[in-house]
Image (tube, helix red, strand yellow):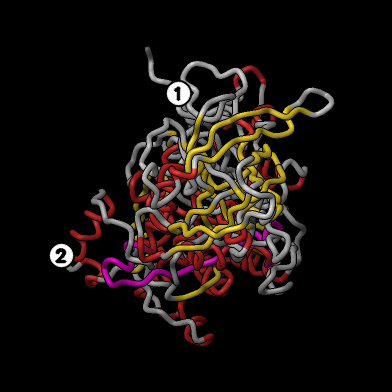
């Protein structure tokens, strides 16, 4: 990982430090990032990625990337590849790449062990009946009529489930714990269900698949994970996590891990500890995979990598840097308190990072012609501009200057309002890097709209001349009309127009809060040096914002730029008067 992110203290780091000091887990730190390959990673996943990989790197440990592929009906190889690409792009590399399906034989042997110990049974209740027997938060559950099935009968039925004898959903293997437990997760949770679905890695070998709560803790144990870091919704699942590990005792039962040795996947099993932290909920976004998938499928966005999406692939295409995302999560920190994080903090991190690294270029997105009347039509020269005002090491570039220029339309106002300090009839303004011009005329089209403004350049205010330091209130940017390159510029903004689009008060849904102005495409003019940028190169269009050359559509002769962020937060609430 790039070492450009400052380390701040938080409670998980303190736990790891204490464990190392006491010699717990042999002083080792082994973490994992275990996504389900049923969608693209988003900003919330980035928090877990930064935490797990960051801690492993900090304490000279290991971090595994493990695909939780126990639900084949929802998984896709496209997502597997995208997840790997996103983790690498964010700046991390895994020590070991694994799949939960690597351990299917271990899960199965562990389930048989629980049956033999009298701690699991095959249940014939269907899903609806099982929910009815489960009880509520205020009422205990009732024992299934099949709970007292003998171990031999349950073992026989389970093996027949494995052989594919029974229909989907007709039988379930359940742990036998306590149907009156206050924690509903301990009320005889399901361990295996029948799903005759082809698996991306194992094909049709397995007609039964383990449930997440069972597969997750066993996967952690067989990989020797020391600190299993989960979000807060798994806090109530921790007693079940620990119960499975106690009963199976993987470190003390080599028969269970024999399939790993046979497949060359052997890692000394351990007893991991689960630690929970608050997930990252961010304003003006939704991060439910189900909702993000619906946005894609219903063509409300242009795919998973639409620059308005909170997916890592979308943020990458938008032009956010990995460093900005890492900075954001380090700045937010790790806690046990759920909260709604202001998206403006992430945008601020992007500005902070890009201000340092992004070279400057000039572009005009809403063009108005400016003609300098005291220069000949053939006038042509090249001016030296610094690529970055705060970093001389980035060097200079040559910018063409001619009589006819493009300026931003809102840099001229025929009837100026109070406080307007740019170009007005009879007024003066400084052209960036050129000198001071005075507006002498306005030329209109037949419909009365302004076609161009005509100015006179004060030659004494040019660089090196006696009047170069003469003060005027406004400075505007420009591009040479003769030399400018036409570009498609996509002005992206927040996808939703309310801070909490998940709030369904009044019967509204997140779809009702889509921002109709979240994407606007304009044709602009850019200086030649901007057109020469490669795909995914970022720059600041002076006075306009930070932009990136689109990673897919930008090409030589056809530049396409996406706005990353504006120079200032346009969503910030005005200060109270």
In the figure, is residue 270 to the left or right of 342? left
- What is the CA distance from the residue labelled 2 to the residue labelled 1? 47 Å
Q: Which residues are magenta?
A: 54-77
Relative image position of residue 543 (x, y in whole percent): 50, 41
Say whether residue 76 is magenta.
Answer: yes
Instruction: Point out the residue furthest to the right here.
Output: 446
Q: Nearer the viewer, residue 469 or 375?
A: 375
Q: Quadrant of the N terminus?
A: bottom left
Q: Nearer the viewer, residue 471 or 484?
A: 471
Residue 195 falls in image quadrant: bottom right
Q: Which mark sits nearer the N-terminus, 2 or 1? A: 2
Q: Nearer the viewer, residue 280 or 238?
A: 280
Q: Quadrant of the C terminus?
A: top left
SS type, badge 1: loop
Say whether residue 248 is magenta.
Answer: no
Say which mark, if any, is on residue 563.
none
Relative image position of residue 535 (x, y in whole percent): 61, 64
**Mark 2 — residue?**
21
Which residue does the image show at 28% across and 66% down from the upper left? 58
For residue 375, above or below residue 261: above
Relative image position of residue 515 (x, y in whole percent): 65, 31
Q: Is residue 69 visible?
A: no
In the figure, is residue 14 to the left or right of 266? left
Binning the other alpha carbons within 10 Å of mark 1 as few (below 14), some (14 to 19) or many (20 upward) gives few
């Amino acid at each position: 990982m790039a070492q450009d992110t400052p380390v701040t203290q938080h409670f998980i780091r303190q736990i790891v430090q204490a464990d190392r000091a006491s010699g717990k887990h042999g002083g080792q730190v082994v973490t994992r990032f275990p996504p389900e390959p049923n969608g693209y990673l988003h900003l919330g996943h980035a928090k877990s990625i930064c935490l797990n990989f960051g801690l492993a790197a900090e304490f000279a440990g290991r971090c595994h990337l493990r695909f939780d592929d126990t639900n084949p009906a929802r998984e896709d190889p496209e997502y597997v590849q995208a997840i790997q690409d996103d983790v690498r792009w964010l700046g991390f590399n895994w020590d070991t790449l694994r799949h939960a399906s690597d351990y299917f034989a271990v899960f199965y042997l562990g389930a048989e062990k629980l049956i033999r110990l009298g701690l699991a049974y095959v249940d014939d209740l269907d899903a609806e009946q099982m929910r009815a027997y489960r009880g509520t938060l205020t009422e205990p559950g009732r024992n299934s009529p099949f709970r007292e099935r003998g171990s031999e009968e349950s073992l026989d039925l389970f093996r027949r489930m494995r052989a594919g004898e029974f229909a989907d959903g007709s039988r379930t293997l359940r742990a036998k714990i306590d149907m009156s437990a206050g924690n509903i997760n301990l009320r005889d949770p399901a361990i295996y269900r029948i799903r005759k679905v082809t698996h991306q890695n194992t094909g049709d070998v397995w007609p039964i698949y383990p449930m997440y709560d069972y597969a997750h803790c066993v996967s952690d144990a067989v990989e020797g994970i020391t600190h299993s870091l989960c979000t807060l919704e798994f806090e109530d699942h921790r007693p079940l996590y620990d119960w499975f590990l106690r009963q199976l005792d993987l470190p003390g039962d080599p028969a269970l891990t024999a399939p790993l040795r046979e497949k060359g996947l052997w890692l000394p099993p351990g007893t991991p500890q689960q630690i929970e932290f608050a997930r990252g909920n961010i304003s003006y976004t939704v991060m439910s995979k189900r909702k993000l998938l619906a946005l894609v499928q219903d063509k409300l966005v242009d795919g998973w990598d639409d620059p308005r999406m909170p997916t890592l692939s979308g943020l990458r295409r938008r032009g956010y840097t990995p460093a900005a995302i890492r900075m954001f999560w380090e700045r937010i920190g790790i806690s046990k308190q759920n909260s709604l994080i202001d998206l403006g903090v992430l945008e601020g991190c992007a500005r902070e990072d890009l201000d340092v690294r992004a070279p400057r270029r000039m572009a005009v997105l809403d063009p108005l012609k400016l003609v300098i009347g005291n220069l000949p039509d053939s006038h042509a020269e090249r001016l030296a501009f610094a690529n970055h005002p705060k970093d001389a090491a980035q060097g200079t570039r040559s910018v063409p200057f001619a009589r006819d220029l493009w300026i931003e339309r809102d840099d001229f106002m025929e009837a100026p309002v109070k406080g307007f300090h740019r170009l007005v009839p009879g007024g003066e303004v400084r052209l960036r890097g050129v000198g001071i011009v005075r507006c002498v005329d306005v030329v209109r089209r037949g419909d009365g709209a302004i076609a161009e403004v005509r100015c006179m350049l004060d030659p004494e205010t040019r660089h090196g001349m006696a009047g170069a330091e003469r003060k005027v209130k406004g400075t505007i940017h420009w591009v040479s009309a003769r030399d400018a390159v036409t570009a498609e510029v996509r002005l992206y903004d927040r996808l939703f127009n309310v801070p909490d689009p998940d709030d369904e008060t009044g019967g509204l849904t997140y779809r009702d809060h889509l921002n109709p102005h979240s994407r606007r495409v304009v044709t602009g003019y850019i200086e030649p040096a901007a057109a020469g940028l490669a795909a995914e190169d970022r720059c600041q269009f002076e006075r306009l914002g930070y932009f990136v050359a689109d990673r897919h559509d930008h090409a030589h002769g056809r530049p396409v730029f996406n706005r990353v962020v504006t120079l200032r937060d346009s969503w910030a609430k005005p200060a109270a008067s």
